[in-house]
Image: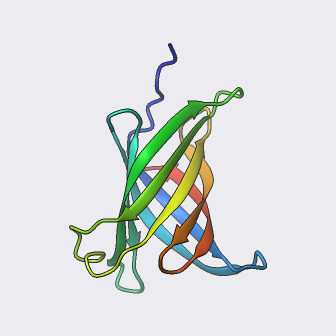
């Protein structure tokens, strides 16, 4: 039996939203919290909005899958959707898929995400433990 890694807690996430040609459309930051779930870690993400620094979206993960890679890193795959209980996302819906690969040292993670039912975009993700 493989022991799950300690990836729980707060992470600073930086996202780069890509245009269809692969160029950068815009960059954004979010607070990401990895929490204990029933079968795998869950993810709560709150993006930071504009100059005010306020939140402009919040998402919750579902259908999470965590696997150990041969090099000692860990990959977390999950679906996500808008949090209907949060003031910033109560009035609109979105959902998508993400995957993050946590380095063997469990300090950094990189991955990608795609969003549907709204912006239909692909994003590169980079996270660092806070």
- Can residue 10 be seen in this snapshot? no
Q: Quadrant of residue 70?
A: top right
Looking at the picture, does residue 121 appear above or below residue 33?
Answer: below
Q: Is residue 127 above or below residue 93?
A: above
Q: Position of residue 98 (x, y in %)?
A: 54, 55
Q: Position of residue 14 (x, y in %)?
A: 54, 64
28 to the left or right of 22: left
Q: Residue at x 66, y 30 (%)?
A: 69
Residue at 53% across / 80% down in the picture? 119
Number of numbered discs: 0
In this picture, residue 92 sits left or right of residue 121:
left
Q: Quadrant of residue 47?
A: bottom left
**Does residue 82 appear left or right of residue 98 in this picture?**
left
Of residue 127 and residue 90, the one placed in the foreground of this image is: 90
Instruction: Name the image colouring.
Output: rainbow
Q: Please state the horizontal and vertical placement of residue 3, each as a whole percent of the image.
A: 47, 19
Asked if one can make out residue 35 in the rendered structure from this viewpoint, the answer is: yes
Query: Where residue 75 appears, x then y in whole percent?
Result: 58, 39
Q: Is residue 67 left or right of residue 34?
A: right
Q: Residue reaching furthest top? A: 1
Where is 125 relative to 40, above or below? below
Q: Check the image and name the residue furthest to the front.
A: 117
Q: Residue at x 23, y 70 (%)?
A: 86
In the displayed orientation, state which residue is furthest to the bottom.
51
């Amino acid at each position: 039996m493989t022991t799950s890694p300690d990836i729980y807690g707060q992470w600073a996430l930086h996202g780069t939203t890509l245009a269809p040609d692969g160029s950068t459309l815009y960059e954004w930051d979010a607070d990401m919290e990895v929490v204990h779930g029933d079968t795998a870690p869950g993810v709560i993400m709150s993006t930071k909005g504009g100059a005010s620094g306020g939140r402009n979206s919040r998402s919750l993960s579902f259908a999470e899958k965590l696997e150990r890679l041969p090099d000692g890193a860990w990959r977390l795959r999950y679906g996500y959707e808008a949090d209907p209980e949060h003031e910033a996302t109560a009035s609109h819906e979105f959902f998508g898929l993400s995957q993050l690969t946590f380095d063997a040292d469990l300090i950094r993670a990189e991955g990608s995400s795609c969003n549907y039912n709204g912006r239909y975009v692909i994003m590169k993700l980079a996270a660092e433990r806070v």
